[in-house]
Amino acid sequence: MARKRVGNKRERIIAAAAKLFGERDYHDTTTAKIAESAGVAAGTIYIYFRSKEELLVAVFEEFLGRHMDRLREGVEREKMPQDKLMRLLTLGLELMEDNPDSARIFLSQLRQSTKMITTVVKRSSRAYKDIIEDVLTECARQGLCRDVNVHAAASMLFGAFQSTVLDWVAHECSYSLTDMNGELTEFILHGICSSDREEESAAQ
Amino acid sequence: MARKRVGNKRERIIAAAAKLFGERDYHDTTTAKIAESAGVAAGTIYIYFRSKEELLVAVFEEFLGRHMDRLREGVEREKMPQDKLMRLLTLGLELMEDNPDSARIFLSQLRQSTKMITTVVKRSSRAYKDIIEDVLTECARQGLCRDVNVHAAASMLFGAFQSTVLDWVAHECSYSLTDMNGELTEFILHGICSSDREEESAAQ
Amino acid sequence: MARKRVGNKRERIIAAAAKLFGERDYHDTTTAKIAESAGVAAGTIYIYFRSKEELLVAVFEEFLGRHMDRLREGVEREKMPQDKLMRLLTLGLELMEDNPDSARIFLSQLRQSTKMITTVVKRSSRAYKDIIEDVLTECARQGLCRDVNVHAAASMLFGAFQSTVLDWVAHECSYSLTDMNGELTEFILHGICSSDREEESAAQ
Amino acid sequence: MARKRVGNKRERIIAAAAKLFGERDYHDTTTAKIAESAGVAAGTIYIYFRSKEELLVAVFEEFLGRHMDRLREGVEREKMPQDKLMRLLTLGLELMEDNPDSARIFLSQLRQSTKMITTVVKRSSRAYKDIIEDVLTECARQGLCRDVNVHAAASMLFGAFQSTVLDWVAHECSYSLTDMNGELTEFILHGICSSDREEESAAQ
DNA sequence: AATGAATGAGTCTTCATTCAT
DNA sequence: AATGAATGAAGACTCATTCAT
């Protein structure tokens, strides 16, 4: 029970930080507010984290750690590359929907610039893209894919995914994010233009 | 001549701010550094801008103003919806490549959260998406598009576009951004999956 | 045994504090570091000492208590005032050499200024000077001394003594402090004692 | 006049710092108190000094700069080594008496421990001792001195001098420091100079 | 219009001290 | 007696903004 409390505090600080960093932004969130929101004293934060920046990193890694694991698991459970791709998108949206605070910070901090932050952010979006690239590579190997530059494609896919989540967050999570699954999957799988176009161009 | 100088100063401040906001980030950029980089006194900034935040807004709008205009022009010069779409992507990449500083701030600030900033950012990415939506709507109207949710599609397209530029910036603009034009266009027009799949589904 | 342990702890805390206060300085030494170095918990210090300041006082008095006693003893063992003076210097250097940590804190803290510290420091350097003054007074009474202001002379003697030790500490105790005994004794004897003495000794 | 004000501010901050550092001690003196005492805003200190520590250094160097110069000048004006020595002591006491604040900080900080401080303090007490050593060396060369270890002797002399000033400061400068000149001079001359001198003077 | 010295509110962080266990 | 997690007051320093010149 004592142990539980300790764990509680670290978790509570991370949760409070995730919430606040997501709501406003890193610089607009004071350690005082985080402490207050976590229900601990100002100094307590520094028992668990060396600095405010390290707290941000922790928030980030905590979220991504769980996120990536579940994503990988889900993808690996599928056999067909195409199903993997679909699962990737579906699961991604679901996870974001379940952790709106973390989603918000994932999106909003993603493009900050302090040295340390950038490093961590890069590392974690790398993690994300790695999964995507793996799936795309597999698709390509089985001939299910156009002959794409996998790296570029992963990046675009990631961008489309992020944008979708960002829209949802911008609308204050007022609709179900998974409702967008169809659209996103269609976009990624089919492309936005009708196959008519391809037939046309094939006709030329 | 006095007037010219004045204009000069405003421009120089905006240019310096664009450069610095892009290099580091809004909070890590002090007005003192901006003033120094612009070659003016600290107080001078406040003759032209009510606050640091308003300066950011100005930087933003200045960039987007020119950007959007050229984008719209280029798109309108094309007749065919599909060509419009392609032109949109090509021009977009070109404009980013020509203004790396602005590109950087466009990307990095895009997801900050201060009240006013968010407002402006939303307004400007709205502008961007409006153009995209217009083009997509036209495509749809001519049956060149799958029956997409234009709003969502625009958002995804925008995300893929941003991601492409972001990658380039992350690689310190070390390659030509327009080289990615092919990939991006392919991605957007065709989708990443092989047309086999589409033929398959067409066969159904 | 429990009691022994208790005594142990108090001593260990004082020893750790003496070491650390000497190495860095009062303000740069945290109670946490003292506790760690003493191998006790942070709170334990406050079982034995009311405050950090009181710990400093204890360190001080502990050192001076032993120091003064041994000094007095040694001096009293000598019969001749002049021998007492010489013994005072010799013993003083020896004691410092044997307790470099305490020597360091004795010197470095000697001129701090916090209210309580000053009080204690004054009290303890008083103790030191008292012994010196006693010896000098005796010398004067027996006509072995120039007609000096005993108080001032004691102060100067003390200063010269301190400076000698301080030099040694500044050189990181890399040479034997007692090697300076000759120089110091000469300086003091000539400086304070009447030239009669010299004639006397010359007469021998 | 504007310039005068600027200079004024730097000087006022140094003066206020000298006063407060001397009264209490470095750590017990807050930058807020210094600013208040100097009649400037808290931030103003950081226009003139990079940090609180650098301010201490400045206080120190400012005092010692003037001090050393005047000391050297005075010493060089004398022809006879012995007169130089006497002048050194007399002038030293006079300068201290004229700048009680600086004297206090000179004495109290002399044995602090922060890295940078120690460096500066060492550098400056070195300066002091250099002058002393120069004079002593000259005395030795002319046979007016016992065959002393000049370095050690300089250190003792410095210690005796400091102690004298410290006593005065401890008595809150309630008597005239120069009144101690006779005692100090006697102590030093006897302590350092050869007894030949005494015989000489006895012969007169 | 321009300057840049001055301001002072606001922030992160440290650390002596307490207290429930 | 002992622990060590928690506290929260205090302090150095930053920086957007102002204003006398």
Image: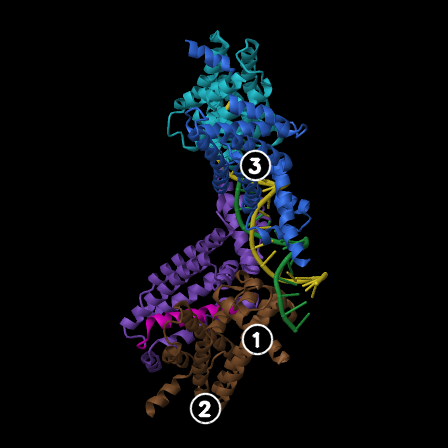
Chain colours: A blue, B cyan, C brown, D purple, E yellow, F green
Q: CA distance from mark 2 to mark 3?
A: 85 Å
Q: Residue furthest front?
A: B204
Kindly state the secondary structure of the residue where label 3 is placed: helix
Query: Is residue A75 in sight in this rendering?
Result: yes
Q: Residue furthest top?
A: B79
Residue flagged by tag 2: what amino acid is it?
A: Met
Location of mark 2 (residue): C80
Name the residue located 61 percent from the left edge and 46 percent from the top edge: A14
Name the residue located 54 percent from the left edge and 26 percent from the top edge: B47
Q: Foreground residue, C193 or A141?
A: A141
Location of mark 1 (residue): C11
Residue flagged by tag 3: what amino acid is it?
A: Phe
Q: Foreground residue, B36 or C21?
A: C21
Which chain is home to disc 2? Answer: C
Tag nearer the camera, 2 or 3: 3
Residues in magenta?
D146-167
Location of mark 3 (residue): A106
The quarter of the displayed image where residue B112 is located: top right
The overriding secondary structure of the stretch rendered in magenta is helix
Q: CA distance from mark 2 to mark 1?
A: 38 Å
The quarter in which the C terminus of chain A is drawn is: top left
From the top left corner, tell me how far across and down residue A130 is, in percent: 47, 37
Tag nearer the camera, 2 or 1: 1
The quarter of the displayed image where residue B90 is located: top left
